[in-house]
Amino acid sequence: MKFKLNLVTLALIANTSVFVPNIAFADGYGVQNANTDKVKFDKWACKRCAIDTGVSGSVGVGVGYNDSNDIHSANAFAAENEFAGKVDADVRYTNESGYRTTVEAQDLGMENGHLDVNTGRVGQYKINLNYRQIATYDTDSAMTPYQGVGGDHLTLPSNWQTAGSSQDMNELYNSLNPLELSLKRKRAGLGFEYQGEELWSTYINYEREDKTGLKQASGSFFNQSMMLAEPVDYTTDTVEAGVKFRGDNWFTALNYSGSSFKNQYSQLTFDNAFNPTFGAQTQGVMALDPDNEAHVVSLMGQYTAGSTIMSGRVHYGQMSQDQALVTSGYGYQTPVDAVDAKVDMSGANLKVVSRINRTVRVNASYDYSDRDNKTNVEEWTQISIDSATGKVAYNTPYDFTTQRGKVGVDLRISRGMKLDVGYDYRRDERSYQDRETTDENTLWAKYHLSAFDKWDMWIKGSYGERDGSRYQASEWTSNESNSLLRKYNLADRQRTMVEARVSHTPIDALTIDFGGRYALDDYNETQIGLTESKDVSYDINLSYLLNDDMMVNAFYNRQNIDSEQAGSTNFGAPNWFGLVEDQVDVVGAGFSYNNLLEKKLRLGVDYTYSDSSSNTQVQQGIAGDYGDYNAKVHNVNFYGQYQATDKMAVRLDYKMEKYQDNDPGNSIAPDDIWNVVGFGYNNHDYNAHLIMLSMSYKL
């Protein structure tokens, strides 16, 4: 018998004696009996099996000019200075012995840049080095009379004259200086993974994050307050380590995760800008975020038995903080110098997925988590806003226990038709709360249809109810509240939700995708508080390939959230009603044109516009409007990339952002409120531009 040999046949011949030495083939028809006398084995080389060695990939650099008079634009451009630079890289190195190194960098040098380096030997070990920078900017036009901003001691000018109201402070406007409210995070990490024998591997990762900047805070003396710039200088160290074991049908891992948080500043001292009335001090002190630690040990595993997969995880951890209390200005003896707070955390997760037959699959899961606050309860002298009551108060050790259970069935009705149904249950137990226990029950179903050519669609609906134990105020919560008041996260609730999505490809070059969602939360037993919340959203996406070189895409999304609430001014039945209407519209489009100028030039533009608004109306006999809030943002990016040589490409980007908002909370002069010294006007209204020239080189 004669037949032609191909690469697969040769591979079988070469490996038969190694992997299947005891297989008997009938009457000499096995591949090892093939006639190979005329085969030239040296000509048969698997080109795709060869491992590329050496250096490959690309590197790039960029320099840009930033034109902006509002630092808020740095959230979009990732550049706060006038000039910006960046480094990009996607480099791989491999040698014949299996050592491999990869370097990935994107926008390194910008405010959102990151770097990731991996090196090691495939299948044996890997070393990872990573770095990331994240920044968020609020404003650079906040105004304050305080000196020493950036430190933990804020003082007023030597010529400051206190007054009973901010309007009477003669030196207020003469003393104002601008400050920047922004936060920057820098993360650096080092990791190591080692693959031992076939059954086990281990890893350890270390990461340090430094967070610096200024954030908004306030200090008060009875009913008078000043807006303050709180210094942020945090360091968080995180360590993760573990060992993994793997078999043919099982997997298990033992893991440890620990973190240590350090704050450079323990307290913030500030001068009183007002006349010290009612026994108030001329200087105030506020405690800042305390140092703390957290440690968690977990054991997880997975086992496969036929068509059934079982997995689970158990964990135990503890959070603690014992920093000394800030007692400056308190005026009373504290029962302890440090709270020595401890919270134990434990939990378990179990999940089972089993395929009954070709059309039915069932899944079930159970989650348990417990937060046990073991902080000692001490007696404290309580100070109210108008006088020292002398009444004894206690720190409250809140405990939480949550249990979740889910059961679902996936039913494949026929080809292109699938039905999923399920039941979800949740119980929350809380100590020292208005309601100690709440139970949630939810039924849901999802139908997926893809049987029609060029159509894919699904619809999902659910209905859930939350109830629980008796709702009552207590001395631990607020016995001064209206007895009819219900907190929305504890109140009885009926939740109805429907969402659907349809995708259609009428022609190969055009794809249309549409989706919508409707959710209604009805707090049916609430008289005072949030009574109803409705969330409606829909979106449409379009992608069209005009020809082989031109492509256009566009999208539109809208979301409306309406919240209704009722209140009372006399601690009785509701006598005023409020409506909050939130709306967000986002629209975008993009166009690209490739292979211009002898297939060397690519041009494109991306544009997005978002408009978010909120309006609050209150009705108490007559309707009152609290005023609108809105923010409008236009973002556009024009770009062109030219392939100068086979290896070098040059790209030019022009980005523009037009931003405008009118937050009433940021539209207040430093002395608009008589008992507040504010930060002044901090709304945004700007046009910002960024031009970036970059070059990439293919190795």
Image (cartoon, rainbow, N blue to C red):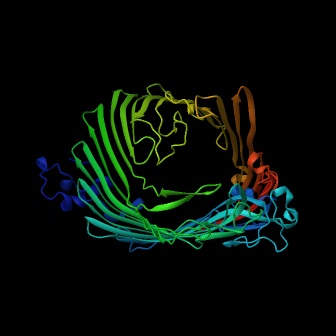
Query: Residue drawn at (62%, 64%), measured in percent from left and top?
Result: 113
Residue 272 image-quadrant placement: bottom right
Locate residue 171 relative to residue 636 in the image: left or right: right
Q: Quadrant of residue 121?
A: bottom left
Q: Residue furthest front?
A: 390
Above or below for 694 versus 445: below
Vertical placement of residue 369 versus 235, above or below: above
Which residue corresponds to the image point at 34% horizontal and 29% vertical from the top-left?
412
Residue 479 percent location from the top left of the image: 51, 43
Please give left or right for residue 623 compared with residue 379 in the image: right
Query: Is 78 situated above or below 559?
Result: below
Q: Nearer the viewer, residue 267 or 428?
A: 267
Q: Is residue 633 visible?
A: yes
Quadrant of the image occupied by residue 435: top left
Q: Is residue 181 left or right of residue 398?
A: right
Look at the image and tell me in which quarter the C terminus lies: bottom right
